[in-house]
Image: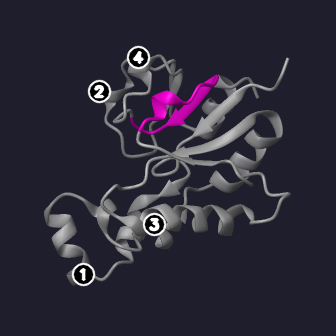
Amino acid sequence: MGRRIVYVDMDGTLVDFASGVARVDADFAAPYLARGHPDEIPGVYSLMDPMPGAIDAFRELAERFDAYILSTAAWRNPSAWTDKLDWVKRAWGAGDDSPVFKRLILSHHKDLNRGDFLIDDNDVHGAAAHDVPTIFVTWGYGAPAETAGTVGVVDTADELRAALGL
């Protein structure tokens, strides 16, 4: 039997989205923020910090699971697609020995991926509603109402480790 498959979201789970927005010039960001779409700010994804402990945590997951990063890139922000790839390479390395080598999946349909778990801070793309076993992490940007249908809700990295049997 193969290793269990785990998908991990980026924004709000591995990556501190707000840290990138804070680094963008306020005048440049203003029209995007006024529309409620900071995710459409060109280059914003290249400016983000990792969530505390996220780099080591994903490395640990990759040692124990068949682990992938599963993220949605803003449709109206072409730089988001390349910025996310570049961010992942900076965080874990770009070589064949990187735990993320060819393990970044960008999709607006997380429910099309099949695995044992999705670790995510929101369910805006409906993974839990489509029977994708989702562990909701509260340290991101999701709302409590999005926990419906999830297989678990965790507040800390230690709780996540326990939920995954680590």
Where disc 3 sits, the SS reads helix
Q: Name the residue under label 3.
A: 45
Camera-side mark, 2 or 3? 3
Quarter of the N terminus within the rendering:
top right
Camera-side mark, 3 or 4? 3
Q: Count how many numbered circles sit on residues in the image.
A: 4
Looking at the picture, which amino acid does disc 4 mark? Gly
Where disc 1 sits, the SS reads helix
Q: Distance between the residues labelled 1 and 4?
A: 38 Å
Looking at the picture, which amino acid does disc 2 mark? Ala
Mark closest to the chain's N terminus, 2 or 1: 1
- Horizontal side, residue 22 vs residue 29: left or right: right
Give the extent of the magenta segment: 109-122
The reply to whether the C-beta atoms of the residues labelled 1 and 4 are less than 8 Å apart is no
Q: Magenta segment: does it hold 120?
A: yes
Name the residue: 29% across, 27% down.
145
Looking at the picture, which amino acid does disc 1 mark? Phe
Q: Magenta segment: does it hold 166?
A: no
Q: Mark 1 points at which residue?
A: 28
Q: Residue 145 carries which label?
A: 2
